[in-house]
């Protein structure tokens, strides 16, 4: 039977109980399955012939009625073999999973299609989240799709304009609070515990992560049912790295892959409590009061899922690394120019982290690596414009543009004709 269980004390909760933290010890919950039941379902299922998408994996998901799924066609994103980037970095084999191809431009849609489907199953009418941007954009879209009210709390300070525009146009009630993301999250948690009619869809909600685990399934399926040696991804609140690890271990338990990847989390230097704990060999994190980085999607000082993330990194024999804002911006340009993939700064941190780890000898030359590019570059156009060369300006005359382009001496027609 599908149920929820506490990751610390093991206390069980019904799949339909609205509970965000363990009532006994206060820790996070996760969704548990009887894998023999899933195995039996898979034998009768046509999942292997379906097109790649989150809902290709509905047999692995905790939903009751597939006809009630709230979808915008999420998942099924490209996994790009990046040879030019391999040549630049010197690594063995590299793929980029481009999550910017999701309906609202980030992997958050994988979690929201499931989270909102669950909200509808539970007959909720209002959903809420705290967000640095992409969570609110995604929640607002799926809430609109399902006809639910949506409230989003965003922290004060900088937020990427693309994301804010999305939340606003989808009709969410957007509230900017004078405080940090971590304070905003505490507020939505308290609010949804006090007012039970408001359903919380931050990644503290274990159903979100169930949708996000499809990212791991897709990577394996795109690599012909094999896990890569290593998965590198940015870590903010740490829900995604936890979700991916759950996905890989489930595929492994079900006998669909025979090895597991090393989970490698990248954080921005000014917001790196998990990377610090990994480097120090600590079992706890030390929250950061004022996290700072241009990669706003990972500007989080007290990651909710830190315990799940430390577990994922350690169990998988992976690692964590920090990168500076300069390294992130350089990686963003490198990925765009060498492979045609424009990702937001947080996403580029996975490439920056890979570069750093490889250069310091912590990644082997023969590894098959997947970097997760978590969100689309257009989410934050200001950054790209600021860091790229300005457009040239010339008079509207042939001579001026020829001069600019260095095309002043025409090649005789006889030379170019065949
Ligand atoms: C949410 C987000 C992250 C961080 O994911 P967590 O699950 O919070 O660790 C990274 N990149 C982008 C683009 C995001 O939207
Ligand atoms: Zn507990």
Image (cartoon, rainbow, N blue to C red):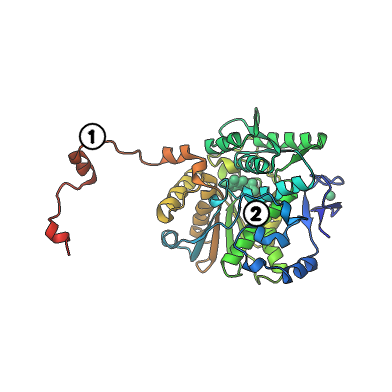
Q: Earlier in the sequence, mark 2 or mark 1?
A: 2
As displayed, is residue 19 above or below residue 242?
A: above
Front residue of this view, candidates 29 and 175: 175
Tell me, yes or no, whether the two marked residues, 2 and 1, touch with CB atoms within 8 Å: no
Residue 172 screen position, x and y as percent: 65, 34
Asked whether residue 313 is in view, the answer is no
Q: Is residue 311 left or right of residue 77?
A: right
Q: Quarter of the image containing the N terminus?
A: bottom right
Q: Is residue 356 left or right of residue 75?
A: left
Query: Farthest top residue?
Result: 178
Q: Mark 2 or 1, which is nearer the eye?
A: 1
Query: What kind of element bears circle 1?
Result: loop
Q: Quadrant of residue 391?
A: top left
Front residue of this view, candidates 177 and 393: 393
Ligand 1 within 8 Å of disc 2? The answer is: yes
Asked whether residue 145 is in view, the answer is yes
Question: Dot 1, crowdedness within 10 Å: few (<14), some or many (≥20)?
Answer: few
Q: Is residue 1 left or right of residue 375?
A: right
Which residue shows up at 73% across the image and 36% down it?
188
Residue 140 screen position, x and y as percent: 64, 39
Q: Which residue is mark 1?
A: 395
Front residue of this view, candidates 291 and 1: 1
Q: Which residue is mark 2?
A: 241
As displayed, is residue 203 above or below residue 43?
A: above
Residue 71 screen position, x and y as percent: 65, 50
Mark-to-mark CA distance, 2 and 1: 51 Å
Which residue shows up at 49% across the image and 56% down it?
355
């Amino acid at each position: 039977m599908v149920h929820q269980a506490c990751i610390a004390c093991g206390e069980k909760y019904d799949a339909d109980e609205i509970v965000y933290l363990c009532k006994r010890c206060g820790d996070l919950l996760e969704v548990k399955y009887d894998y023999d039941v899933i195995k039996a379902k898979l034998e009768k299922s046509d999942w292997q012939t379906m097109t790649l998408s989150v809902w290709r994996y509905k047999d692995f998901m905790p939903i009751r009625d597939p006809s009630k799924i709230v979808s915008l066609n999420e998942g099924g994103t490209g996994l790009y073999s990046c040879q030019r980037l391999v040549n630049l970095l010197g690594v063995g084999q590299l793929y980029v999973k481009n999550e910017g191809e999701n309906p609202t431009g980030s992997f958050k849609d994988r979690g929201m299609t499931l989270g909102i489907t669950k909200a509808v199953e539970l007959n909720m009418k209002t959903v809420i989240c705290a967000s640095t941007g992409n969570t609110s954009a995604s929640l607002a879209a799926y809430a609109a799709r399902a006809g639910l009210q949506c409230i989003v709390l965003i922290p004060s300070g900088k937020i990427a304009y693309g994301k804010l525009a999305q939340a606003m146009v989808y009709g969410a009630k957007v509230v900017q609070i004078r405080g940090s993301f971590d304070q905003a999250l505490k507020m939505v948690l308290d609010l949804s515990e006090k007012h039970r009619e408001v359903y919380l869809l931050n990644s503290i909600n274990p159903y979100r992560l169930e949708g996000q685990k499809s990212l791991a399934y897709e990577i394996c399926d795109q690599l012909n049912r094999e896990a890569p040696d290593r998965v590198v991804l940015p870590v903010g609140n740490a829900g995604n790295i936890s979700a991916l690890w759950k996905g890989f271990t489930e595929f492994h338990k079900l006998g669909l892959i025979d090895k597991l990847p090393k989970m490698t989390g990248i954080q921005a230097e000014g917001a790196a409590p998990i990377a610090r704990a990994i480097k120090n060999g600590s079992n706890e994190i030390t929250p950061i009061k004022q996290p700072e980085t241009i990669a706003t999607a990972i500007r989080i000082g007290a990651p909710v899922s830190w315990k799940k993330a430390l577990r994922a990194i350690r169990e998988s024999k992976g690692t964590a690394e920090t990168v500076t804002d300069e390294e992130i911006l350089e990686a963003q340009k490198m990925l765009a120019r060498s492979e045609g993939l424009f990702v937001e700064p947080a996403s580029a941190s996975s490439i920056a982290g890979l570069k750093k780890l490889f250069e310091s000898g912590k990644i082997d030359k023969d590894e098959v690596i997947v970097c997760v590019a978590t969100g689309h570059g257009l989410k934050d156009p200001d950054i790209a414009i600021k860091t790229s060369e300005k457009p040239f300006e010339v008079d509207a005359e042939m001579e001026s543009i020829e001069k600019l382009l260095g095309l002043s001496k025409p090649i005789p027609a006889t030379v170019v004709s065949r």
